[in-house]
Amino acid sequence: MSYGLWRRNLPGLVVLLLASSCSFQWIQEYDLRELLEYGDLWTARYQLRHRQEPDTRILTAYQLAQLEHYAGNWERSNALFREAEDLNDQAARRSDSELWRKAGASAVTLRPFELAMGPFYRTLNFIAEGKVVEAVEEARWSNRLLLRAAGQQVTRGSGAEESAALARNPFFDAVAAMVLEWSGRNEDAYVAYRNAVVGYHRQWPQIEVAPPPWLGCDLRRTGLPLDHGDEIRDLERRFPGLVGCAGDSFGPDEDRGTVAIFVEVGWVPETRLQDVEIPVLESDAFDHPAEWMEALVGRTAASWQPKGPVSRTLKLKVPRRDEASDEEIVAAGLSVLGSKRHGSVKIASAVVEDLGRRAQLDGERAEAEALAEAILRAILTSGASLDDADATESTGATPWIMERTPRNPPPDRCWRTLPSAIWLFRADLAPGDYDIELELMDDFGNVVAWDVLYDVEVRAGEWSFFNRRVF
């Protein structure tokens, strides 16, 4: 599960000499994405390890854990992910308290779709270490985090992940299913494959990621021996074409093993601060922060018109996600090269997750939340009390809430090193050792990224997992 960097016309690795006391200030000038695009994983990790800003501690831990995964430092990566998850939980609890808000603190916590990627990387780390039980637990934890964020009480080790809540991500169900099957837990694997089938159907209007061509085969392979034929036929009726199986059967059996290669491409859309101006009327005089917040949020609508003279304008900064960019990569191919033992080969590839689109949809929801939070922060950090004698002057023209700009605007940071999309390559191969070449192409058929995995060992009836990163 090695780290792969591919880029068209790659100019080479950036080599930074750290020979003086001011060298770190020089390194800080480089953007993380630029460093990774140039293949300078070492400097990117060094830069993250030496970050000092306290409000970016959580994001730094997540990003560094991800880069340690790419570097093949599985154990360190997992430790950092666990630390980051704990820090995020603590910050989220603190940011819910009124005292925390009044203190003007800015906790940079992650969005649910970002949080769910941590267990994905941890799963791959545990697989690389050969820790089956731990890998299974982490593979199921991604959707549990999403369910918990949606308001369901979920803890590690609980069974709540079998809920059919819309908060689920079918990509994580599919990953969990493969890992469960790899561990020999076929009943649980079947349930996860079933959840993935339902999930891809439910998310299609928003995410538009089609179910991978092998999903129906996976469902049948695990479900039919366990007498789930009636349920599978019911799913075929409910989702015609979704539970289909392209061509011959996919997946490991007594004559072949399956190589599954995740390929991360692109960059997730960034979050940036947007200026928002909200008019305050001379006639405004509300008795409670909630009333202020409700009234001012409504004034951001394009159709709102002031009814009376405007006293002043409240100027806020609200985070907004960039638009998801069109992916340069539109097709993929996999070739088995120089196999040391020849046999039947079945190959397929598909986009299985669109984080770019998911981030954009989440950003639309988060923008409304952030606007309300920014207004509330302006209220609670204004330096006055609702009981102040001059809170409402006789003229009622200038309420105390609008007397100053908020001291701490909401953070504009996000997990910037996440990919915009994830492809999955699957190859069913006879037992043996193989060299496997990956190719990613644009809409003109040009190869824009490629790599070779050497000496991939395939065993009958077993799975082999790899992860690669493309820029």
Image (spheres, grey):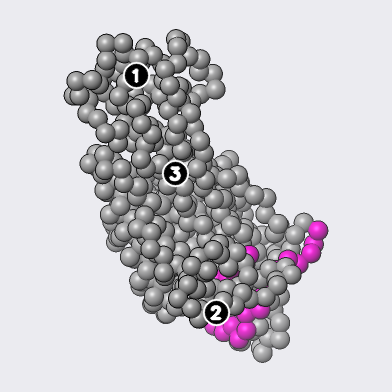
Residue density around tag 3, few if under 14, some if 14–19, many if 20 or more, within 10 Å: some
Say whether marks 3 and 1 touch (CB < 8 Å): no
- Whether residue 367 is situated above or below residue 66 in the rendered picture: above
- Residue 453 within the segment the image draws in magenta: yes
**Residue pointed to by mark 1:** 398
Task: Compute the Cα span from label 3 to label 1.
Answer: 45 Å
**Residue pointed to by mark 3:** 166
Foreground pick, 328 / 239? 328
For badge 2, the amino acid type reads Leu
The residue positioned 54% from the left and 83% from the top of the image is 459
Task: Compute the Cα span from label 2 to label 3.
Answer: 50 Å
For badge 1, the amino acid type reads Thr
User: Where residue 418 sits in the image (x, y, percent)?
Assistant: 52, 59
Q: Earlier in the sequence, mark 3 or mark 1?
A: 3
Say whether marks 2 and 3 touch (CB < 8 Å): no
Where are the magenta residues, as a range? 444-471
Foreground pick, 187 / 78? 78
Q: Quadrant of the C terminus?
A: bottom right
State whether residue 424 appears in this view. no
User: Where residue 305 sits in the image (x, y, percent)?
Assistant: 51, 15
The residue positioned 33% from the left and 55% from the top of the image is 88
Dominant SS of magenta comes to strand
Residue density around tag 1, few if under 14, some if 14–19, many if 20 or more, within 10 Å: many
- Whether residue 357 is situated above or below residue 371 in the rendered picture: below
Task: Compute the Cα span from label 2 to label 1.
Answer: 57 Å
Foreground pick, 24 / 48? 24
For badge 3, the amino acid type reads Leu
The residue positioned 45% from the left and 31% from the top of the image is 315
The label number, if any, that marks residue 39 in the structure image: none
